[in-house]
Amino acid sequence: MPSSTPVRDVMSTKVVTLRPDQTVEEAADVLAADRIGAAPVVDASGNLVGLLRDEDLILSEANVHVPTAITFLGADFVLPSALHRFEDELKKAAGAIVDDAMETEFATVSPDDTLEHVATLMHDREITHVPVVEGGKLVGIVARGDLVRHLAATT
């Protein structure tokens, strides 16, 4: 895969999107019907406000991790990172709408970024989907499968 290939040559431009006010059940139906693992969430003005991944939906069916606590000299200390993870998982597990379950901190790329950049981003952050944004608006999405298909076509 030529590292200088721009994202625009590989990204999907017919992007299935969700709204923050949709129910989690509706979102699951959309992801399943379109056989996709994630969908950008856009508000009424078309602004990208989140990313809902199948992992976020699966969490609602999984056991929530209880925070790690350490007892020292009779006092219990909850590790801050464990507490933050617990709060995030609890919020998602209880969420009835997309806004409750979606990721609000996620990576984006521009159409002019290179495949090397997006592949590195996906690898380093262990993510499978990256929205493509230009001028503040969603213009596409890149999934790991897009990179694999491009690799197969160019080798």
Image (cartoon, rainbow, N blue to C red):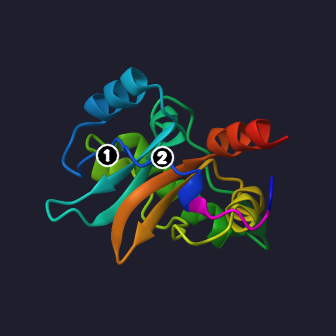
Q: Which mark is residue 12?
A: 2
Q: Amino acid at mark 2?
A: Ser
Kindly give the residue lying farthest to the top in the view shown: 33
Looking at the image, tell me whether mark 2 or mark 1 is earlier in sequence order: 2
How crowded is the residue under tag 2: few (<14 C-alpha within 10 Å), some, or many (20+)? some
The answer to which of 112 and 67 lies nearer the viewer is 112
The answer to which of 117 and 4 lies nearer the viewer is 4
Q: Secondary structure at mark 1?
A: loop
Q: Which residues are magenta?
A: 3-7
Q: Quadrant of residue 83?
A: bottom right
Identify which residue is drawn at 56% across, 72% down. 112
On the picture, is 76 further left or further right than 132?
right
Q: Is most of the magenta stretch helix, strand or loop? A: loop
How crowded is the residue under tag 1: few (<14 C-alpha within 10 Å), some, or many (20+)? many
Identify which residue is drawn at 65% across, 61% down. 82
Kindly give the residue lying farthest to the left in the view shown: 44
Identify which residue is drawn at 53% across, 51% down. 11
Q: Position of residue 21 (x, y in %)?
A: 18, 48
Does residue 102 sit above or below 106 in this rendering? Answer: above
Label 2 with label 1: CB-CB less than 8 Å:
no
Residue 6 within the segment the image draws in magenta: yes
Identify which residue is drawn at 34% across, 41% down. 16
Q: Which mark is residue 36?
A: none
Residue 99 within the segment the image draws in magenta: no
Q: Which mark is residue 17?
A: 1
Q: Position of residue 15 (x, y in %)?
A: 37, 45
Q: Amino acid at mark 1?
A: Thr
Q: Position of residue 19 (x, y in %)?
A: 23, 49
Q: Secondary structure at mark 2?
A: loop
Gap in angstroms between the C-alphas marked 2 and 1: 12 Å
Q: Position of residue 131 (x, y in %)?
A: 48, 58
